[in-house]
């Protein structure tokens, strides 16, 4: 039996990874802009992190594979005690994949959320990241996305992951969509502007990540601010640098210079750190979690042959085998077990408000070693009864069918008068009203709404509130058929969802699939569902739908810069209906 400390999510029974000889996939470690990372075991019991390239990158750009092969060759040359080793790859597989050494432990983002770090630990983390960059750059590689979630804190020290291969994906995204790349709060000004990224760009990201280790936030703003507001702070060049142990203060200040030429090199940073006595690496006791057993994924009882899903005229749609309902229930059991971990909820995202807790369904797997994290003393997770199976007369819809039936209810928000202009989605809750996120649009904005067919309608914001993070837009004419809310108490962990929306500024309609991995409750009902769907920041305000087309909830981006990284929330109807009613809307209960 395999045991690990890192959070692990269940495999998607409807879109799991293509089998690879000699490896057994045990679960999903995370999803990024480049691909999905799986935990796998070989025939001799060794563990690997296998990154599988997103198929849409290959489909969107025929030259992607050539660039990826070049980058992968460089990454394979990186040798460092502060990075995982690349152990195997197959660049001609469909899709290509790369296997690296599996590094167990907390990522920096989650670790800091648990408790503030002592100065000695901040210094040790800063040093480990700097030496990792030194070795990465020596191989001719630029990381391009150094941030807290890409730093793993293990028993032997900090390890930097996900380096180098982002360039091939980055060039594809820039060429195909004109989208911005990098993580708000950690990407330097030149990367935000789409200019050349160099080792000095990694130095800027290193400094931002050091500040996060000391304070729990980027020096350019809290993660709950809109991404555009954080980017503007970086462009203005006014970081809020915390008190740091010597010699980090002057190094970080110089590294955060707006001009790459004014930043120190990694060699200069390491030279300065060599002159001080670095503390012995030792994780705090509260991060030394007991290892948890990983159950073997249960094989589906029946699988239909995979069918190719062709892209719609306005977006990419995912493909994969259809699995019978029995397999989905098994996935729900696995999701419930794998989603729990000691001392925290699924993703250690901040809870929505006092008293909100993580809710999971019963599991036949071994019990967790500690209850899910709660926001107030005495709160406990709730355990819902298992809902009945879907009506057999209402079979699941394919992504194409969902888009064809419900896609016209989802509109792109093109706003003026707010920080995140032209970066969000909205959907119809009646023929003249749409719901979106508050952080997508401000109360005094005059939004233009654009349909998939490029119809443009002027809207008016009639209500907006930061908690829950929603706003309501009114239009002067009937613009379509509204979506129907799912009955919140019938939703279940492991249930498939499909998110529709618009990623960023490129205007491309997308479809993203995933599962419900947990719920959050506040004592009166379910506040939100969490999903592992790879949702882009531009999907904020769009709907997450069941595979019969009912709205699970409103997608909300809880943290800036979490594109394809963290598990987003879907605000449920039970949580939103009173707030929407207070905005004087006539909606069905």
Image (tube, grey):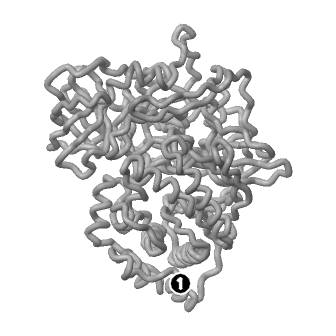
Q: Is residue 534 visible?
A: yes
Judged left or right of residue 139, residue 192 is left
Q: Nearer the viewer, residue 20 or 1?
A: 20
Residue at the spot 33% in from the left edge and 24% down from the top edge: 408
Specify whether residue 353 is in view: no
* 429 vs 77, nearest the viewer: 77
Provide residue 28's location: percent of width, then percent of height. 63, 44
- Asked which secondary structure carries label 1, the reply is helix
> The C terminus is located in which quarter?
top left
**Residue at image location 67% in from the left, 28% down from the top:** 330
**Percent from the top left, x then y, of residue 467?**
31, 42
- Residue under the image location 23 percent in, 29 percent down: 455
Please tell me which residue lies in front, 470 or 387.
470
**Pointer 1 residue:** 267
Front residue of 313 and 431: 313
Q: With respect to residue 34, does 586 lie above or below?
A: above
Residue reaching furthest to the bottom: 275
The residue most toward the right is: 44
When asked about the image quadrant of residue 402, the answer is top left
Residue 450 point in image, percent of width and height: 25, 33
Q: Quadrant of residue 238?
A: bottom left
Asked if residue 305 lies left or right of residue 534, the reply is right
Image-based side of 452 in relation to 171, left or right: left
């Amino acid at each position: 039996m395999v045991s690990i400390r890192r959070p692990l999510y269940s495999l998607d029974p409807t879109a799991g990874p293509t089998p690879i000889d000699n490896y057994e996939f045990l679960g999903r470690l995370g999803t990024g802009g480049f691909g999905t990372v799986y935990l796998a075991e070989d025939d001799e019991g060794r563990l690997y992190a296998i990154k599988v390239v997103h198929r849409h990158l290959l489909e969107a750009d025929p030259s992607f594979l050539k660039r990826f092969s070049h980058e992968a060759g460089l990454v394979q040359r990186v040798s460092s005690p502060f990075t995982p080793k690349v152990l195997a790859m197959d660049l001609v597989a469909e899709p290509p994949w790369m296997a690296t050494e599996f590094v167990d432990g907390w990522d920096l983002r989650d670790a800091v959320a648990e408790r503030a770090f002592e100065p000695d630990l901040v210094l040790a983390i800063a040093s480990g990241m700097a030496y990792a960059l030194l070795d990465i750059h020596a191989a001719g590689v630029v990381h391009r996305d150094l941030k807290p979630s890409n730093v793993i804190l293990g028993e032997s020290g900090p390890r930097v992951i996900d380096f180098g291969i982002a360039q091939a994906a980055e060039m594809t995204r820039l060429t195909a969509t004109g989208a911005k790349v990098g993580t708000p709060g950690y990407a330097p000004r030149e990367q935000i502007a789409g200019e050349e990224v160099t080792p000095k760009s990694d130095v800027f990201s290193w400094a931002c990540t050091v500040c996060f280790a000391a304070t729990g936030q980027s020096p350019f703003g809290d993660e709950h601010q809109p991404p555009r507001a954080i980017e503007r702070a970086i462009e203005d060049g006014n970081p809020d640098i915390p008190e740091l142990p010597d010699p980090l203060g002057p190094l970080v200040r110089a590294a955060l210079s707006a001009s790459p030429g004014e930043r120190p090199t990694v060699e200069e940073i390491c030279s300065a750190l060599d002159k001080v006595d670095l503390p012995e690496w030792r994780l705090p006791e509260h991060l030394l979690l007991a290892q948890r057993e990983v159950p073997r994924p249960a094989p589906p009882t029946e699988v239909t042959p995979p069918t190719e899903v062709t892209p719609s005229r306005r977006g990419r749609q995912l493909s994969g085998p259809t699995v019978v309902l029995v397999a989905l229930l098994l996935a729900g059991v696995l999701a419930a077990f794998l989603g729990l971990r000691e001392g925290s909820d699924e993703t250690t995202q901040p809870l929505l408000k006092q008293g909100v807790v993580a809710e999971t369904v019963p599991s036949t797997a071994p019990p967790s070693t500690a209850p899910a994290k709660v926001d107030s003393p005495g709160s406990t997770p709730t355990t819902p009864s298992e809902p009945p199976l879907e009506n057999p007369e209402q079979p699941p819809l394919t992504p194409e069918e969902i888009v064809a039936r419900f896609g016209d209810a989802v509109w792109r928000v093109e706003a003026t008068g707010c920080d995140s202009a032209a970066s969000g989605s909205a959907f119809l809750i009646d023929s003249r009203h749409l719901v979106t996120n508050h952080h997508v649009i401000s109360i005094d904005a005059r939004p233009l709404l654009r349909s998939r067919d490029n119809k443009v309608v002027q809207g008016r914001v009639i209500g907006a509130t930061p908690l829950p993070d929603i706003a309501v837009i009114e239009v002067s004419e009937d613009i379509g058929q509204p979506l129907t809310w799912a009955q919140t108490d019938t939703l279940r962990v492991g249930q498939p969802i499909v998110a529709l929306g618009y990623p960023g500024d490129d205007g491309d309609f997308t479809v993203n699939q995933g599962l419900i991995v947990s719920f959050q409750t506040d004592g009166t009902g379910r506040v939100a569902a969490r999903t592992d769907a790879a949702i882009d920041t531009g999907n904020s305000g769009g709907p997450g739908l069941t595979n019969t087309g009912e709205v699970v909830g409103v997608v909300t981006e809880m943290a800036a810069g979490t594109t394809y990284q963290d598990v987003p929330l879907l605000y449920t109807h039970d949580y939103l209906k009173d707030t929407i009613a207070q905005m004087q809307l006539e909606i069905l209960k």
